[in-house]
Image (cartoon, helix red, strand yellow):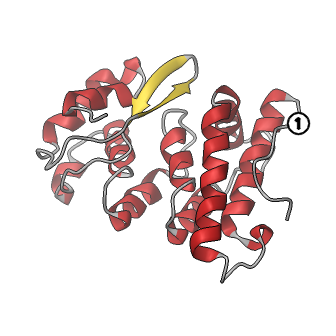
């Protein structure tokens, strides 16, 4: 199902609605409507994040005219861009954030096929291994509230490894995506205090 541009407001919590609208006001017209939203919970609030957007990127001076929060919203949206290089550039601006509304954009990218994006996520989530870090708490909370979404992400990581990267990483345990999933799973265990189901190969 396609989204309209105004539907992009639904990708963020209601408290950000004015900031999201300010960002959308400066984004260029999309060539194609945003595609296939996926629903997740941020805290107790349901949002619908676009699978892909098709707007051209903004000039640097326009980006700089936005507030810090608005720039983060912009980078979240462009992390869903149809061009993988654009997704990676904008991901790198938000991956280190511990804002709960950023988390699903990052986790969704963990389940996509570009190895360099996985490496950028791991670099940005440098605090994820640290117990009680804000980053670990934010990701643990998100996964605890979205177990089905995380299970699908795990399966996608395995599928892309098997299809594109098994030649380079003969066992799943050596694949960067495996290490990232282990960290995310550990964050969920910390958050819930219970073992977390695994949807990946044993090694």
Q: Compared to 174, does 24 lie above or below?
A: above
Residue placed at 71% from the left, 42% from the top? 136
Q: Compared to 151, does 148 lie above or below?
A: above
Residue placed at 21% from the left, 56% from the top? 57
The image shows residue 141 at horizontal and vertical percentages of 68, 30
Q: Secondary structure at mark 1?
A: loop
Q: Is residue 130 left or right of residue 71?
A: right
Q: Residue furthest bottom?
A: 167
Q: Quadrant of the N terminus?
A: top left
In this view, the residue in front, 20 or 52, is: 52
Residue 129: in sight, yes or no? no
The image shows residue 2 at horizontal and vertical percentages of 27, 36
In this view, the residue in front, 135 or 199, is: 199
The image shows residue 202 at horizontal and vertical percentages of 86, 59
Examine the image and state in which quarter residue 29 appears. top left
The residue that label 1 is drawn on is 195
The image shows residue 64 at horizontal and vertical percentages of 24, 50
Q: Compared to 91, does 34 lie above or below?
A: above
Q: Is residue 181 left or right of residue 48?
A: right
Residue placed at 13% from the left, 50% from the top? 31
Q: Is residue 195 left or right of residue 119?
A: right
Residue placed at 37% from the left, 49% from the top? 80
Q: Quadrant of the C terminus?
A: bottom right
Query: Label 1 crowding class (10 Å Cα cut-off): few <14, some 14-19, many 20+?
Result: few
């Amino acid at each position: 199902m396609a989204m309209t541009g105004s539907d992009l407001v639904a990708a963020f919590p209601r408290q950000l609605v004015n900031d999201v609208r300010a960002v959308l006001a400066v984004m260029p017209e999309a060539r194609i409507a945003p595609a296939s939203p996926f629903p997740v919970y941020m805290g107790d609030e349901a949002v619908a994040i676009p699978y892909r957007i098709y707007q051209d990127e903004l000039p640097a001076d326009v980006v700089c005219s936005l507030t810090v929060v608005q720039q983060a919203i912009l980078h979240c949206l462009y992390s869903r861009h149809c061009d993988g290089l654009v997704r990676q550039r904008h991901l790198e601006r938000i991956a280190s954030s511990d804002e709960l509304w950023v988390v699903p954009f990052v986790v969704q990218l963990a389940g996509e096929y570009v190895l360099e994006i996985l490496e950028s996520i791991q670099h940005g989530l440098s605090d994820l291994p640290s117990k009680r870090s804000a980053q670990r708490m934010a990701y643990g909370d998100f996964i605890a509230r979205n177990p089905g979404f995380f299970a699908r992400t795990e399966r996608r990581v395995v599928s892309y490894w098997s299809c594109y990267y098994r030649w380079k990483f003969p066992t799943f345990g050596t694949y960067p995506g495996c290490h990232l999933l282990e960290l995310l799973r550990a964050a969920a265990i910390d958050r819930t205090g219970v073992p977390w189901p695994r949807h990946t190969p044993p090694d």
